[in-house]
Amino acid sequence: MPDFRRFFAPGGTFFFTLVTYDRRPIFRAETPRALLRSAMLAQRQRRPFEMPGIVLLPEHLHCLWTLPSGDADFSTRWRKIKEDFTRSFLAAGGAEYSVSVGQRRKGLCGVWQQRFWEHTIRDEDDFGQCLDYVHYNPVKHGYVRCAHDWPWSSFHDWVRRGVYAPDWCCFCRPPDRPRPVFTDIEERVGE
């Protein structure tokens, strides 16, 4: 059995990946996207964190969080977000996949994978590489040809701030640019 260990860095910045149960594409629809946004905003009110980057795809999401100084409790935040989302998703008519009797006894249901993947950001270069990975992810998975075409991403905020050019890694205008290489992150995330 795997031995999951988390590195808790108070006030740190973290990269996360969360996946729906059985990679079910529940975030294709507007209602689940709105419910997730609501759950995240509610949790930010109760337990503040900054979210400098996010991308929401049909069956998973990647995001970056920075926690307040002295606070390293990202696990409680994610548990509460997943619980709040699941409760409201099921109340709104969303369906869950069936889970085993043992999983049900543990209080699990078929909406999210049980755990999440986390990486502690080491420095500015690591932050930049993770942010690029977040914004390139819809292109990587073939949903769009260019990062600017994916509406459920913080990419547009970073363009407005002048950090990214609007045509960053853009394949819709000639000449086609080579695909960015994210080997280190891809190996860590397992995508």
Image: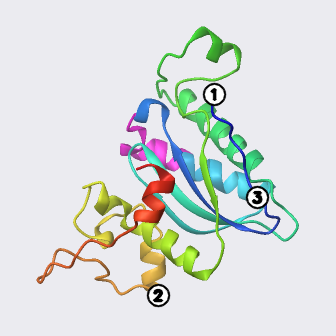
Residue neighbourhood size for the residue with mark 3, other residues' Cα within 10 Å, grouped as few (<14), some (14–19), many (≥20):
few
Q: Secondary structure at mark 1?
A: loop
Amino acid type of the residue that numbered disc 1 sits on in the rendered structure: Met
Q: Nearer the viewer, residue 109 or 10?
A: 10
Q: Is residue 106 above or below residue 152?
A: above
Disc 1 to disc 3, C-alpha distance: 36 Å
Ranked by sequence position, the earlier of labels 2 and 1 is: 1
Q: Which mark is residue 163?
A: 2
Query: Which residue is tagged 1?
Result: 1
* Quadrant in the rendering for residue 186: bottom left
Give the residues in magenta: 24-35
Amino acid type of the residue that numbered disc 3 sits on in the rendered structure: Gln
Give the mark toward the camera: 2 or 1. 1
Callouts 1 and 3 close, C-beta under 8 Å: no
Q: Where is residue 66? Give x, y as percent.
A: 70, 68
Q: Nearer the viewer, residue 92 or 124?
A: 124
Query: Which residue is tagged 3?
Result: 45
Q: Nearer the viewer, residue 102 or 107?
A: 102
Q: Which mark is residue 49?
A: none
* Quadrant in the rendering for residue 133: bottom left
Q: Which residue is rendered at x = 30% and y = 60% of the image?
A: 140
